[in-house]
Image: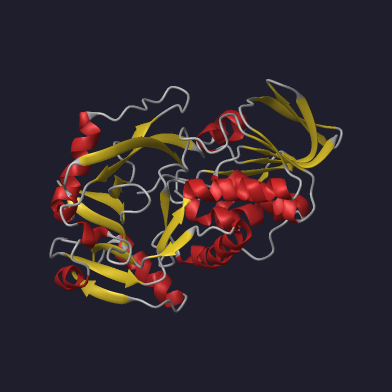
Amino acid sequence: MIFDAIVIGVGGMGSATAYHLAKRGARVLGIEQFNIGHDLGSSHGVTRIIRLAYAEGSSYVPMLRRAYTLWREIQRVAKERLLFITGGIDAGPEDGAIVRGSLQSCRDHRLRYEQLDAAALRRRFPGYRLPASLVAIHQPDAGLVLSERAIVAYVAAAQAMGAEIHGLERVRSWKVERGRVLVRTDRATYSGRKLIVTAGAWASKVVPYLLRRRLAVPERQVLIWTQPHKPDRFAVGAFPICNMEVKERGQLSRYYGLPVFAVPGFKFGKYHHLHEETDPATMDRECSPRDEALLRSAIQCYFPDAAGPTLAMKTCLFTNSPDEHFVIGKHPAHDRVVIAAGFSGHGFKFASVIGEVLADLALEGCAEHFDLAMFDPTRPVGRLP
């Protein structure tokens, strides 16, 4: 059998890609080295933030708008709610990157927003207790996506349309030969007209080009859930998702927080946690007292009403590009191979639309609706200042 497309990695991006390919009538094979829906990559931990006031760049907003539409589409298909609107806070120094970037996105795309000082923010949303030096942008369309359930929904919908999904099967190699892509695993060899690599933190192991250019560098990340002293302040409807930066000991630190949802506890994390580059095969997956102390210290400082006992901690993985923009496009040496990697800790919210974009690239050769130049695998990249 020759597949129209083979997808390596069936997590957030790969599951959505398999769905969009199958929806168009393509014969699809998805290959995942772990269980379908596992906790060894980047998509576990129950929830992920979604937001329109995008501090990372105004040019992301059109893709985000399409992502919202597509999240609602898969909800209807799955008959399960996956997207919850809570409103969102982007907070930081008034001249800092988060506030400036969030405002730029709001103004460029005429998004609804309100600017609040720290005192007004606390009055409106008492769970927040930010320093007086910070300001906040409140954008009401932000919220959360159920990441683990979304993968299940996309896989089930893809299977219902004929996609073949293999779990617990490890890819050993691939090559382009005689107009086909041959993928060899520890079980069999498969032939496809196109190959799409959505392998997350393992992407550089699958595509050596990414390794050579350090376009997809894995990093250890840690999440914590704590029991609020005042639970009503951290419930959905009372606590907007949080994206914030603050100067600590002379350096900018960036944190994120989500309301209590589906599992007990206020969810909190620090972007780039301890700046630990890692190999996903050998990463320390235990959470240490140092990890806990770092996160609890920040919760005590900025969200003290959530600083009750620790309920759970988990490690996960970021996969970083040097400029923290995504890597999406055709392999520079193989027109039949499409790459999606380097999502740098802010990619999951886009999974619904990236699946559509990758299906476009594989089946049509281009993605007409979006300018993907900033994601080009061959772009010049340098580290962020």
Horizontal arrangement in the rendering, residue 316 relative to residue 184 (left or right): left
Q: Say which of 365 and 358 sits in front.
A: 358
Q: Position of residue 61 (x, y in %)?
A: 50, 66
- Vertical placement of 185 versus 319: above or below? above
Q: Say which of 190 and 311 sits in front.
A: 311
| Residue 377 shows in the view | no
Q: Residue at x 35, y 36 (%)?
A: 314
Q: Residue at x 79, y 45 (%)?
A: 27
Q: Position of residue 276 (x, y in %)?
A: 34, 32
Q: Say which of 58 and 227 sits in front.
A: 227
- Vertical placement of 203 versus 133: above or below? above
| Placement of the N terminus among the 4 image quadrants | top right
Q: Position of residue 334 (x, y in %)?
A: 73, 39
The colour mode here is secondary structure
- Vertical placement of 281 versus 176: above or below? above
Q: Residue at x 49, y 45 (%)?
A: 148
Q: Residue at x 46, y 32 (%)?
A: 40
Horizontal arrangement in the rendering, residue 353 relative to residue 331 (left or right): left
Residue 124 occupies quadrant: bottom left
Q: Position of residue 118 (x, y in %)?
A: 17, 68
Horizontal arrangement in the rendering, residue 169 relative to residue 68 (left or right): right
| Residue 189 shows in the view | yes
Residue 67 occupies quadrant: bottom right
Residue 170 occupies quadrant: top right
Q: Say which of 244 and 72 sits in front.
A: 72
